[in-house]
Image (cartoon, rainbow, N blue to C red):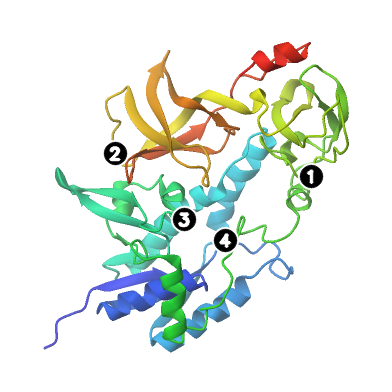
Amino acid sequence: MSERRERVIVGMSGGVDSSVAAWLLKQQGFDVVGVFMKNWEDDDTDDYCTSREDLVDAAAVADVLGIELEAVNFAALYRERVFAHFLREYEAGRTPNPDVLCNSEIKFAAFLDYARDLGADGIATGHYARVRRATDDPARVELLKATDASKDQSYFLHRLTQQQLAPVRFPLGEIAKREVRAIARREGIPTHAKKDSTGICFIGERPFRDFLARYLPRSPGPMVMPDGTVVGQHQGLAYYTLGQRQGLGLGGKRGGSAQPWFVADKALARNELIVVQGHGHPLLYRRHVEVVDMHWIAGHAPSLPLRCSAKTRYRMPDAACTLAETDGRLVATFDAPQWAPTPGQYLVPYDGERCLGGGVIAAAPSAPVATTAEEASAVA
């Protein structure tokens, strides 16, 4: 009698990454089954929804690989666990990251449960990240950065638990993106030239403000400089995020400067959007970032204070900082000021290549409205 092969259920999105992940696992001798997850259907006939096309692509890949493909609809769960949170955060003036919640609540929770019902020994996705057993405790799983630093996605996976990480395989963790494309072309995988998806899955390529306006009412108000000078009108604080440059509608010289405008803060009580000129304006920088709802991948907090590096945005480089409790609050103090840490986004600390977890960036005290240029320069 032949030995039973280990069964791995692969989340297949219809993109090249998950396609190659499935191919690699099959080459390694696993019993591979693909699962396509449909997570959004509010505007399923809309030009911006690509789920039908993605399912067709996933089915074409499964056919070439000679594996089964299941399709499962998680749209109701996604709306309840991810999208409702997304709307609450924007309504409160914060900027959430739904991809992080989608991973912890859908792709490595609901999908994991579904895979177990299919008899899975493990699950896999096309994420660029790695896992390993801890050297000091083989029962503990660690989340590591991908070898290809330009594609590393550990930032988006930082809320996964030990139970979620234990059965996971990331076949692309040690492979460069260019190699993934090359494998797909060489093996005749239909998605080899398909563009990578960008942005939030349920918004697609549509204008973000138009999408949000379908769910949150517009509440116009003044755009003001730090000295209180009104320079324009905003459409609603929910539609803007700290550090935003595009879509402000502020052109030309103001105050003798021709530098571009950026969102520096939101004065919620006054419904004012505080804007400044120049990427280097001091009101855009913070050395101290408070974190709430902290999650530690190890299952427990390390000894504090902790020297580590951390990201306040996905594309930002790691920056040296100290995590410590201050008056019952968890605060990251960076060696150098960080550009536009944004409430609702995530601060993710690392110990070298090991992702430690992450927490939600809390709203910093509103930048005081200065009365002179000298006072504005002193605020940070």
In the image, what residue occupies the spot 79% across and 26% down?
271
User: Up-down: is 358 above or below 256?
Assistant: below
Residue 88 vs 184, above or below: the answer is: above
Q: Is residue 37 toward the left or the right of residue 159 in the image?
A: right
Point out the tag, 3 or 1, that comes first from the N-terminus: 3
Q: Nearer the viewer, residue 66 or 273?
A: 273
Q: Which residue is mark 1?
A: 247
* Amino acid at dot 4: Ala
Q: Quadrant of the C terminus?
A: top right
> What kind of residue is marked 3?
Ser
10 Å crowding of disc 2: few (<14), some (14-19), many (20+): few
Tell me which numbered mark, 3 or 2, is placed earlier along the sequence.
Answer: 3
Front: mark 3 or 1: 3
Q: Nearer the viewer, mark 3 or mark 4?
A: 3
Q: Which residue is mark 3?
A: 150
The tag earlier along the polypeptide, 1 or 4, is 4
Residue designated by label 4: 75
- Look at label 2 and name its amino acid: Gly
Secondary element under disc 1, as helix, strand or loop, is loop
Q: Is residue 95 left or right of residue 261?
A: left
User: Residue at 38% of width from left, 25% of height from top?
Assistant: 322
User: Residue at point 38% right, 71% down?
Assistant: 21
The foreground one among 243 and 40 is 243
Discs 2/1, front: 1
Q: Is residue 118 visible?
A: no
Task: Name the mark nearer the viewer: 1 or 4.
Answer: 1
As measured in the structure, the alpha-carbon distance from the residue carrying label 2 to the one carrying label 1 is 41 Å
Which dot marks residue 299? 2
Q: Cα distance, mark 4 to mark 2?
A: 29 Å
The CA distance from mark 3 to mark 2 is 28 Å
